[in-house]
Image (spheres, rainbow, N blue to C red):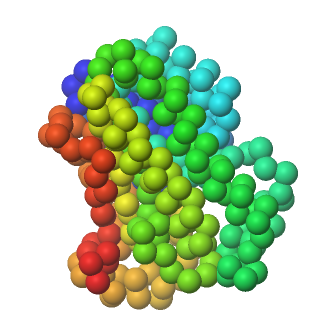
Amino acid sequence: MQGRIALVTGSSRGIGAATAIQLGEQGATVAVNYYRNATAAQKVVETIEKAGGKALAFQADVAKQDEVERMVARIHETLGPIDTLVLNAPASSNSSSEIPAHEQLQAILAPFTGSRWDVLDTFVRGQLQAAYYPSQAVLPHMIKQQRGSIIFVSATHARRPDAGGIAISVSIAKASVEAMIKSMAEELGPHGIRVNTVGGGMILTDLNAGAPQAFKDQMASMTPLRRNGRPEDMASAITYLASNQASFVTGSYLTVDGGNFIV
């Protein structure tokens, strides 16, 4: 990754932070994108710098086109043209919704029969925007350079959904972006741009830190590798796809779930 310039959306915590750090350790200059938590983003930057890498933090709601375009312009001015894009920011980064947060959460957790169209529409649209706007912003430069790598962070729920609850919203939203990603891989291949997806299983982050330990243990017991995933597991897969070691890999779906997808 030496000489590469990477933008990782939603990289102030969890999978995004682990990915930014690994890319920095491998020699990439990293743009650490955050939505609200500037302090956490700066800690990721400092971790990369302590390891001898280079990084800067950039604030933007990636579900808003104007903010994304301003952020990408600042990155190009300060770091250079982006050649690696990791689409990690979730749909929840969409701050434009008029639906109260507690109503969104209730509807997302509800089974299909208790779901609300306005919340589902906001969730799916937000996830698509979080992938669409950054991709649109960086592609002109990638096409000009005739090289680049885009990796979308998805979830296995999108390909093997469970009944009810958040799985419905996640599976629909992530599957929508996955369809877009496959089309992008076909279209952008002739320009030397690779587009891939990493699908995560049960990955322990701060987003599910409040889940009962019994549930986490149950998920681990159902996994062939008998453990839950870590953000670093996802980051390693993403770093591989971003690197020259995957120079002949595009349109792929790399599963990181300890083997659950095969069961």
Q: Dividing the image into 4 quarters, which one contains the C terminus?
A: bottom left
Q: Quadrant of the N terminus?
A: top left
Q: Nearer the viewer, residue 148 or 8?
A: 148
Residue 46 seen: no
Q: Image height check: is 205 above or below 106?
A: above
- In the rendered view, would you say 258 is above or below 192? below
Where residue 248 sits, quadrant-wise, is top left
Horizontal arrangement in the rendering, residue 121 relative to residue 258 (left or right):
right
Q: Mark yes or no: residue 219 visible.
A: yes
Q: Is residue 245 left or right of residue 63?
A: left
Q: Quadrant of residue 5?
A: top left
Nearest the eye: 203 or 115: 115
Q: Nearer the viewer, residue 34 or 81?
A: 81
Instruction: Pinpoint residue 79: horizontal percent, then vertical percent.
Output: 41, 16
- Residue 173 image position (x, y, % from top left): 57, 59
The residue positioned 46% from the left and 25% from the top of the image is: 138
Residue shown at the point (85%, 51%) measured from the top left = 98
Q: Position of residue 210 (x, y in %)?
A: 57, 73
In the depicted structure, whether residue 121 falls above or below residue 182: below
Image-based side of 2 in relation to 55, left or right: left
Residue sitting at 41 percent across and 88 percent down? Answer: 218
> What residue is drawn where x is 68% and y is 26%?
66
The number of callouts visible is 0
| Image location (x, y in percent) of residue 246 | 18, 42
